[in-house]
Image (cartoon, helix red, strand yellow):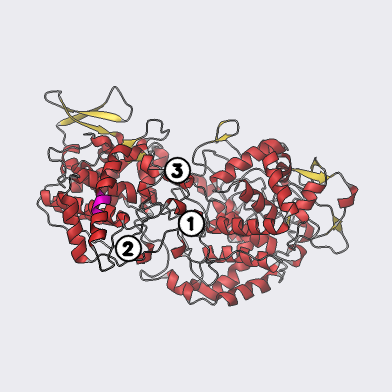
């Protein structure tokens, strides 16, 4: 659903250029911790005890849908509806809200309603979606806190589709609103919109990015670099949609289904006729952008992408018009009235076959985008499209499920889904879990199992590493990963290098024996899952490490995790969760392209940690010695497996001089200043806590003589938080 105008991203006034320079401006290579500050504060206006899930459950969803249906055909003079129906506009709004999702880090997507904030609100691809949100404003005001903008935008897309004759697969609420942009997202390296410097080589998009062009949701609708090359466009489409978690069939269904509705707007050249985007617009426009410079945005004067025309003869009805037009007719490239490449039918049969969007006395000719022709020219996509043409019901079902996946992919497991329209069927992309058909362990059983685990041959560091490996896959961005399901024992996680497969097999084997003996011994229906046992073992080991340092701590433990099986697990999709850097285990993959400390902070954000929590976590893990391959890197203590503050004391010791190691760009040697002998070895991840000013300030707190007990408790709190991040059943 791409509408892609050119855009001038210059400042709204010269005053913006006179803002004071930030530390990041002065020192661009300085480690940026702002993304962790997002986890340390609440910038929204809601009360501390506000519970959005409770508010949503009070919502009369049918009343909201009724209001939306009425809005669909209530055309407003300030922004008239094409064909008298706002449905296609709302579909595009919902699509572009959800379509920022990418599998690499789980960021983007509809959660948070971040289409309201820069940079997304001012992307060229989102031109005039500000009008869609303003049309929705009265409904948002009517229902207030009972429905978030994030939920409302997706609901509006669903109602739009249904109002034009299609039955959607379902709808779930539960997306809470953000009140600022996500500072952790890397949208790309470019300095200007609608440019692309993100290909390591032709056709190979840089790792981690989703869209192929800065400021677009997916790919350039005119074709790569604005060239109407369908074959090259197909390659970009496949790569981009794959990074958005869509296969070929889902991709074709989404494009075909979305382009069944509405039109694109290019009555004239947007560069010459549109004003600045919202973030650069004058203050009196009150957050609206892309104003038509001739003052007329009505009817056929609307300009968005520079591409002009509808796809089908019935742009506000669900039918087979798009697929039939695409496959049954020949198309040729031409420059449209807005100066952009689009495709016109060679056949006279389609000429003037579509009613005008605003003038009943006029007729229009359907068009296609280069990205549409790509679905016909690429043999694999064409095969899918021909199947859809022969089987309209299959097309409909594939679009329904792909749309549901698109708009719900970033919400996590089904237990987070709210409302009466949540479908009973669970999808493999939702990482489903089986139900527990047994009684859960209680306090007595927990104490018994912890004692058995600690009496086994497993070391403290082995238990801590295993629990961490299981829980730390969690990503708060899309609520995937975590310890629940014990997928650590399944492909692909059990063979990840960072998890030390041979040692992991030994640890899991011992825990499975303890599990089997316990479960077999019970006649009262009480059982323990391996997922619970892995976490319980880690907790017991941390408690023992604290006891070794003289501190009595007890980590809260809530049983209830279950064990997933291979049929519950889309193994290929879990590869996106594989860490390239794991700061807690001091693991750094050899071929990473970003500094390890940047990845450390990025991972900490995905775990919803603050800068202080990250610091306590690393210091505690180093004192325990829970390192990848049991190395001494960063283990700045003579008492490993003892929860002390030695890491900070020795890191800050001015008697040690650090220098790079000769054999690795990630490693450093700590030399005794008096003797020159090597006292310690560490990585960039360790040294950043003494190098970065903010992390050093926190480290100095923990490295003080009276702070060891504080470190122990702060580490335990952080550890417990990570172990429970995916326990949505406890909320």
Q: Main secondary structure of the magenta part?
A: helix
**Residue 616 left/right relative to 321:** left
**Residue 157 left/right relative to 645:** right
**Which quadrant holds the C terminus?**
bottom left
Count of picture labels? 3
Task: Tell me if label 2 and label 3 are in contact, CB under 8 Å.
Answer: no
Q: Which mark is residue 507?
A: none
Q: CA distance from mark 1 to mark 3?
A: 15 Å
Task: Return the x and y of residue 561 as percentages of the image width and height.
Answer: 34, 60
Front residue of 621/457: it is: 457
As helix, strand or loop, the secondary structure at mark 2 comes to: loop
Look at discs 2 and 3 and give the one toward the viewer: 2
As helix, strand or loop, the secondary structure at mark 3 comes to: helix
Residue 406 seen anywhere in this rendered image of the structure? yes
**Residue 481 left/right relative to 6:** left
Q: Indicate which disc, 2 or 3, sits on the residue closer to the N terminus.
A: 2
Q: Residues within 10 Å of mark 3 (few under 14, many from 20)?
A: some
Q: Which residue is mark 1?
A: 430
Quick check: 199 above or below 182? above
Front residue of 80/366: it is: 366
**Residue at 77% across / 48% down in the picture?**
326
Residue 309 seen anywhere in this rendered image of the structure? no
| Residue 269 shown in magenta | no
Task: Return the x and y of residue 169 as percentages of the image width and height.
Answer: 60, 64
Examine the image and state in which quarter residue 695 appears. Answer: top left
Q: Which residue is mark 3?
A: 575
Q: Residues within 10 Å of mark 2 (few under 14, many from 20)?
A: some
**Residue at 58% across / 61% down in the picture?**
286
Give, as a single range, the part of the protein colored magenta: 511-515
As helix, strand or loop, the secondary structure at mark 1 comes to: helix
Q: Which residue is mark 2?
A: 560
């Amino acid at each position: 659903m791409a509408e892609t105008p050119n855009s001038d991203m210059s400042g709204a006034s010269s005053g913006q250029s006179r803002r004071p320079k930030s530390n990041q401006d002065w020192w661009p290579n300085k480690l940026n911790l702002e993304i962790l500050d997002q986890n340390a504060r609440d910038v929204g206006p809601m009360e501390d005890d506000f519970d959005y899930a409770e508010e949503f459950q009070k919502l009369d969803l049918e009343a909201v849908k009724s209001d939306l249906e009425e809005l669909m055909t209530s055309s407003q003079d300030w922004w008239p509806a094409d064909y008298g129906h706002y449905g296609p506009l709302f579909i595009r709004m919902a699509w572009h809200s959800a379509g920022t999702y990418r599998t690499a880090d789980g960021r983007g997507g509809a959660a948070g309603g971040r289409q309201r904030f820069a940079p997304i609100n001012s992307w060229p691809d989102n031109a005039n979606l500000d009008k869609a949100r303003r049309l929705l404003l009265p409904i948002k005001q009517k229902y207030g806190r009972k429905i978030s903008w994030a939920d409302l935008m997706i609901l509006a897309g669903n109602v739009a589709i249904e109002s034009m004759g299609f039955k959607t697969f379902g709808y779930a609420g539960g997306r809470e609103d953000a009140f600022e942009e996500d500072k952790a997202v890397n949208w790309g390296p470019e300095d200007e919109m609608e440019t692309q410097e993100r290909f390591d080589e032709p056709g190979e998009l840089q790792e981690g990015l989703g869209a192929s062009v800065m400021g677009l949701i997916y790919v350039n609708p005119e074709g790569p670099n604005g060239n109407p090359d369908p074959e090259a466009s197909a390659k970009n489409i496949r790569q981009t949609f794959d990074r958005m978690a869509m296969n070929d069939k889902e991709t074709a269904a989404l494009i075909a289904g979305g382009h069944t509705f509405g039109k694109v707007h290019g009555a004239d050249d947007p560069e010459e006729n549109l004003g600045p985007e919202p973030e650069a617009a004058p203050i009196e426009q009150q957050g609206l952008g892309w104003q038509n410079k001739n003052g007329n945005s009505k009817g056929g004067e609307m300009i968005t992408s520079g591409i002009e025309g509808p796809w089908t003869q019935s742009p506000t009805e669900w039918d087979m018009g798009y697929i039939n037009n695409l496959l049954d007719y020949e198309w040729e490239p031409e420059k449209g009235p807005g100066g952009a490449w689009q495709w016109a039918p060679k056949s006279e049969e389609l000429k003037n076959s579509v009613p005008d969007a605003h003038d009943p006395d006029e007729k229009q000719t359907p068009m296609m985008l280069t990205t549409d022709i790509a679905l016909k020219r690429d043999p694999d996509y064409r095969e899918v499209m021909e199947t859809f043409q022969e089987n309209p019901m299959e097309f409909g079902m594939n679009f329904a499920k792909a749309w549901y996946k698109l708009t719900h992919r970033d919400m996590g497991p089904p237990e987070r889904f709210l409302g009466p329209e949540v479908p009973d069927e669970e999808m493999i992309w939702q990482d489903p879990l089986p139900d527990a058909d047994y009684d859960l362990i209680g306090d007595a059983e927990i104490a018994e199992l912890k004692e058995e685990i600690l009496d086994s041959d497993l070391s403290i560091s082995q238990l801590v590493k295993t629990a961490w490996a299981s829980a730390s896959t969690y990503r708060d961005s899309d609520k995937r990963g975590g310890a629940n399901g014990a997928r650590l024992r399944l492909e692909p996680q059990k063979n990840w290098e960072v998890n030390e497969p041979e040692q992991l097999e030994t640890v899991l084997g011992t825990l499975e024996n303890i599990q089997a003996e316990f479960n077999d011994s019970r006649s009262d229906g009480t059982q323990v899952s391996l997922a619970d046992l892995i976490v319980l073992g880690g907790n017991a080991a941390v408690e023992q490490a604290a006891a070794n340092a003289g501190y009595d701590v007890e980590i809260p433990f809530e049983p209830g995790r279950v064990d997933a099986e291979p049929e519950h697990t889309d193994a290929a999709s879990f590869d996106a969760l594989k860490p390239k850097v794991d700061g807690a285990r001091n693991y750094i993959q050899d071929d990473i392209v970003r500094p390890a400390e940047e990845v450390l902070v990025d991972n900490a954000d995905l775990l919803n940690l603050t800068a202080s929590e990250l610091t306590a976590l690393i210091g505690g893990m180093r004192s325990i010695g829970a390192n990848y391959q049991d190395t001494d890197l960063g283990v700045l203590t003579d008492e490993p497996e003892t929860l002390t503050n030695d890491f900070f004391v020795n890191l800050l010791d001015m008697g040690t001089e650090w220098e790079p190691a000769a054999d690795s760009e990630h490693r450093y040697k700590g030399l005794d200043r008096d003797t020159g002998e090597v006292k310690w070895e560490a990585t960039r991840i360790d040294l950043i806590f003494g190098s970065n000013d903010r992390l050093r300030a926190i480290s100095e707190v923990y490295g003080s003589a009276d702070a060891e007990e504080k470190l122990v408790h702060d580490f335990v709190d952080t550890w417990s938080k990570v172990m429970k991040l995916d326990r949505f059943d406890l909320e």
